[in-house]
Image (cartoon, rainbow, N blue to C red):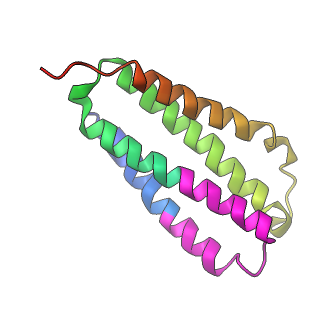
Amino acid sequence: MKIIFLKIAILFAVSSIILGAFGAHALKDILSPIQLNSFLTGIRYQMYHALAILIFSTNHKFFNKNLNIALWIMIVGTIIFSFSIYLLSTKDYLSINVNFLGPVTPIGGVLLSISWIILLFSTEKIK
Protein backbone atom coordinates (compact mmCIF):
# COMPACT_ATOMS: atom_id res chain seq x y z
CA MET A 1 0.00 0.00 0.00
CA LYS A 2 1.21 3.46 -0.81
CA ILE A 3 0.94 5.69 2.24
CA ILE A 4 0.08 8.64 -0.02
CA PHE A 5 -3.33 7.10 -0.78
CA LEU A 6 -4.04 6.68 2.92
CA LYS A 7 -3.09 10.30 3.60
CA ILE A 8 -5.17 11.61 0.71
CA ALA A 9 -8.17 9.54 1.86
CA ILE A 10 -7.86 10.99 5.36
CA LEU A 11 -7.45 14.52 3.97
CA PHE A 12 -10.55 14.09 1.80
CA ALA A 13 -12.53 12.73 4.77
CA VAL A 14 -11.58 15.44 7.24
CA SER A 15 -12.06 18.24 4.72
CA SER A 16 -15.51 16.89 3.80
CA ILE A 17 -16.47 16.93 7.48
CA ILE A 18 -15.23 20.51 7.87
CA LEU A 19 -16.94 21.64 4.67
CA GLY A 20 -20.13 19.83 5.71
CA ALA A 21 -20.19 21.66 9.02
CA PHE A 22 -19.46 24.93 7.24
CA GLY A 23 -22.30 24.27 4.81
CA ALA A 24 -24.76 23.25 7.51
CA HIS A 25 -24.04 26.21 9.76
CA ALA A 26 -22.51 29.11 7.86
CA LEU A 27 -24.04 28.64 4.42
CA LYS A 28 -27.55 27.43 5.20
CA ASP A 29 -28.91 30.98 5.48
CA ILE A 30 -26.79 32.38 2.65
CA LEU A 31 -27.20 29.89 -0.18
CA SER A 32 -30.43 29.04 -1.93
CA PRO A 33 -31.79 25.54 -1.30
CA ILE A 34 -30.57 24.47 -4.76
CA GLN A 35 -27.08 25.87 -4.14
CA LEU A 36 -26.90 24.25 -0.71
CA ASN A 37 -28.05 20.92 -2.13
CA SER A 38 -25.33 21.12 -4.79
CA PHE A 39 -22.74 21.95 -2.13
CA LEU A 40 -23.85 18.94 -0.09
CA THR A 41 -23.65 16.73 -3.19
CA GLY A 42 -19.99 17.69 -3.53
CA ILE A 43 -19.43 16.80 0.12
CA ARG A 44 -21.14 13.41 -0.23
CA TYR A 45 -19.11 12.46 -3.29
CA GLN A 46 -15.91 13.59 -1.62
CA MET A 47 -16.62 11.46 1.46
CA TYR A 48 -17.72 8.44 -0.59
CA HIS A 49 -14.49 8.55 -2.52
CA ALA A 50 -12.39 9.19 0.60
CA LEU A 51 -13.77 5.97 2.01
CA ALA A 52 -13.30 4.15 -1.29
CA ILE A 53 -9.66 5.23 -1.55
CA LEU A 54 -9.10 4.19 2.05
CA ILE A 55 -10.67 0.76 1.54
CA PHE A 56 -9.01 0.02 -1.79
CA SER A 57 -5.57 1.20 -0.72
CA THR A 58 -5.65 -0.95 2.41
CA ASN A 59 -6.91 -3.99 0.50
CA HIS A 60 -4.46 -3.73 -2.37
CA LYS A 61 -3.78 -7.49 -2.40
CA PHE A 62 -7.10 -8.03 -4.17
CA PHE A 63 -6.09 -5.88 -7.15
CA ASN A 64 -3.47 -5.90 -9.86
CA LYS A 65 -1.08 -3.06 -10.72
CA ASN A 66 -3.90 -1.00 -12.22
CA LEU A 67 -5.10 -0.16 -8.70
CA ASN A 68 -2.64 2.74 -8.49
CA ILE A 69 -3.88 4.15 -11.79
CA ALA A 70 -7.52 3.82 -10.70
CA LEU A 71 -6.85 5.52 -7.36
CA TRP A 72 -4.98 8.45 -8.95
CA ILE A 73 -7.82 8.92 -11.44
CA MET A 74 -10.30 8.75 -8.54
CA ILE A 75 -8.34 11.39 -6.63
CA VAL A 76 -8.19 13.76 -9.59
CA GLY A 77 -11.86 13.12 -10.39
CA THR A 78 -12.88 13.85 -6.80
CA ILE A 79 -10.95 17.11 -6.77
CA ILE A 80 -12.38 18.26 -10.09
CA PHE A 81 -15.94 17.13 -9.33
CA SER A 82 -16.36 18.18 -5.71
CA PHE A 83 -14.29 21.35 -5.65
CA SER A 84 -15.83 22.71 -8.83
CA ILE A 85 -19.25 22.15 -7.23
CA TYR A 86 -18.12 23.97 -4.07
CA LEU A 87 -16.99 26.95 -6.09
CA LEU A 88 -20.04 26.98 -8.36
CA SER A 89 -22.40 26.74 -5.38
CA THR A 90 -20.77 29.61 -3.52
CA LYS A 91 -19.85 31.87 -6.45
CA ASP A 92 -22.49 34.47 -5.55
CA TYR A 93 -21.43 34.48 -1.90
CA LEU A 94 -17.74 34.71 -2.81
CA SER A 95 -18.42 37.24 -5.60
CA ILE A 96 -16.25 35.37 -8.08
CA ASN A 97 -16.91 34.36 -11.65
CA VAL A 98 -16.35 30.62 -11.96
CA ASN A 99 -18.92 29.90 -14.66
CA PHE A 100 -16.16 28.26 -16.70
CA LEU A 101 -16.28 25.42 -14.16
CA GLY A 102 -19.78 24.40 -15.27
CA PRO A 103 -18.44 22.19 -18.07
CA VAL A 104 -15.52 21.04 -15.89
CA THR A 105 -17.67 19.33 -13.24
CA PRO A 106 -18.84 16.54 -15.58
CA ILE A 107 -15.20 15.82 -16.46
CA GLY A 108 -14.65 15.02 -12.79
CA GLY A 109 -17.68 12.74 -12.87
CA VAL A 110 -16.37 10.95 -15.96
CA LEU A 111 -12.98 10.46 -14.27
CA LEU A 112 -14.73 8.98 -11.23
CA SER A 113 -16.66 6.59 -13.47
CA ILE A 114 -13.49 5.60 -15.31
CA SER A 115 -11.73 4.89 -12.02
CA TRP A 116 -14.53 2.54 -10.94
CA ILE A 117 -14.46 0.75 -14.31
CA ILE A 118 -10.69 0.28 -14.01
CA LEU A 119 -11.24 -1.13 -10.51
CA LEU A 120 -13.85 -3.52 -11.85
CA PHE A 121 -11.37 -4.99 -14.30
CA SER A 122 -8.44 -4.89 -11.87
CA THR A 123 -9.66 -7.41 -9.33
CA GLU A 124 -7.55 -10.49 -8.79
CA LYS A 125 -8.55 -13.98 -7.78
CA ILE A 126 -8.05 -14.57 -4.08
CA LYS A 127 -5.23 -17.05 -3.64
Furthest residue to the left?
A: 127
Residue at position x 50%, y 28% in the image: 115
Left or right of 14 on screen, residue 95: right
Left or right of 31 on screen, residue 1: left
Q: Is residue 121 magenta?
A: no
The relative height of residue 27 versus residue 121 in the rendered view (above or below) is below
Left or right of 73 on screen, residue 39: right
Residue at position x 51%, y 61% in the image: 16
Residue at position x 24%, y 27% in the image: 62
Left or right of 79 on screen, residue 87: right
Q: Position of residue 85 (x, y in %)?
A: 70, 52
The relative height of residue 118 versus residue 5 in the rendered view (above or below) is above
Q: Quadrant of the N terminus?
A: top left
Q: Position of residue 108 (x, y in %)?
A: 64, 36
Q: Quadrant of residue 29?
A: bottom right
The relative height of residue 63 versus residue 26 in the rendered view (above or below) is above
Q: Position of residue 21 (x, y in %)?
A: 55, 74
Q: Quadrant of residue 78?
A: top right
Q: Is residue 36 magenta?
A: yes
Q: Position of residue 110 (x, y in %)?
A: 64, 30
Nearest the viewer among 100 and 118 is 118
Residue at position x 58%, y 36% in the image: 77
Q: Quadrant of residue 23?
A: bottom right
Residue stretch rendered in magenta on the structure:
17-45
- Number of labels in the image equals 0
